[in-house]
Amino acid sequence: MVVDSTRMYFSIFPKFVGMHKMKLRLQLFTVCFAAYFIALDFGFDLRNLSLSNEVSWWFEGNPIILLSGFLAFFLQALIVYLLLFFNYSKRGLWVTLLFIALAFPFLIGIRYLIQEVLLMQLFGVRNYYFDITFANYLLDNLFFTFQYSLFSFFFFFHRNSMHTERQRVALELQHKKAELELLRSQVNPHVLFNNLNSIYSLVNSKSDKALTAIEHLSELLRFTLYEKREFIPFSDELLLIERYIALHQFRLDYPIQIAIKCAPNTSTLLIPPMSVLTLVENALKHGIYREASEVIIFSAKADVGLTISISNVTKSEIPHNQSIGVGLEHLQRRLQLLLPNRHTFTILRHGNRFEVTMNIN
């Protein structure tokens, strides 16, 4: 199960990235370009670095020339945008810039074809004077082509940065989900299968406790297989804890000394499934609970959120630099993923008494 979860954890990201490519959004491009085109004519003249003086052209000039200019500049900007869209992620910035630079003569030719050839043939008008030299026409159009290509750069890199941020957030979410599944797959078998040997012994000795033990184990298995909620009521977790303690008791020939004190108003509060069970399992695994002086103390109260505390006596004094164990480390990580900034998890060592306190806001 752990191997399968790990394989899923490392294979989920290429599939996810392939399903979420940036879209062209040509309608949005057209609307934004129209606003950019109008702003340049009505607003700021980039060439003269001053307010535009072409307002009268919109009302007194030839609308055919105006519309043809919009069409020519739009096609230029669109081609630059398409070159960025289809080449930037595959070939990098410098190769894409080279493609765009090589395309400039073609972009200028588009405007010449629309405003100097087609307009003359269809309407008998043209945008430039008949006596304009090739050098002047080329220099003038290099500026305008660059001016409207800037829009394509702004539009593309703005959308690309937004897309990258969405990808980052989405991948982070998928990463958290995959890690949670991996952590849960490691916790559940550890909690459940530790009891199989004791149940086997009960069945082999034909003990009348065997059926009850199997029933408790089936409840834990059912919860493990079918419980997919990220949070469950604390009362549901308590039922699991009772069954787990009963299963553990079957392995012993003396009663477990454990004191459970839970305030009534805690039953409906939500917690990650099997989180408190992990604390109980850790106390039963590492604690001593044969005598009344070695009692495991388990308490839950609802002051600011839900506070759960469990303490147990260990065989010897625990060094403060000793590792807390894999189970508690996994629980801490699950809480960080599910409840960032909404929980505290503290561990205290008083001689040979080990205490864990978990608060969920």
Image (spheres, helix red, strand yellow):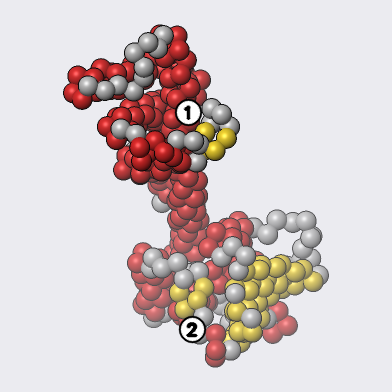
Mark 2, secondary structure of its residue: loop
Residue 86 x %, y %: 37, 28
- The part of the image, by quadrant, that contains residue 117 is top left
- The part of the image, by quadrant, that contains residue 83 is top left
Mark 1, secondary structure of its residue: helix
Measure the alpha-carbon separation of dots 1 and 2: 63 Å
Q: Which mark is residue 30?
A: none
Q: Is residue 164 above or below residue 48?
A: below
For the residues bearing labels 1 and 2, Cβ distance under 8 angstroms: no
Residue 131 x %, y %: 37, 10
- State the residue at coordinates (39%, 65%): 228
**Which residue matches tag 2?**
268
**Which residue matches tag 1?**
147
Q: Amino acid at mark 1?
A: Gln
Q: Is residue 320 above or below residue 231?
A: above
Graded by Cα atoms within 10 Å as few (under 14), some (14 to 19) or many (20 or more), the crowding at tag 1 reads: some
- State the residue at coordinates (37%, 29%): 73
Q: Quadrant of the C terminus?
A: bottom right
Graded by Cα atoms within 10 Å as few (under 14), some (14 to 19) or many (20 or more), the crowding at tag 2 reads: few
Q: Which of marks 2 and 1 precedes in the sequence?
A: 1
Give the total number of marks visible in the rendering. Answer: 2
- State the residue at coordinates (54%, 27%): 47
- State the residue at coordinates (34%, 13%): 130
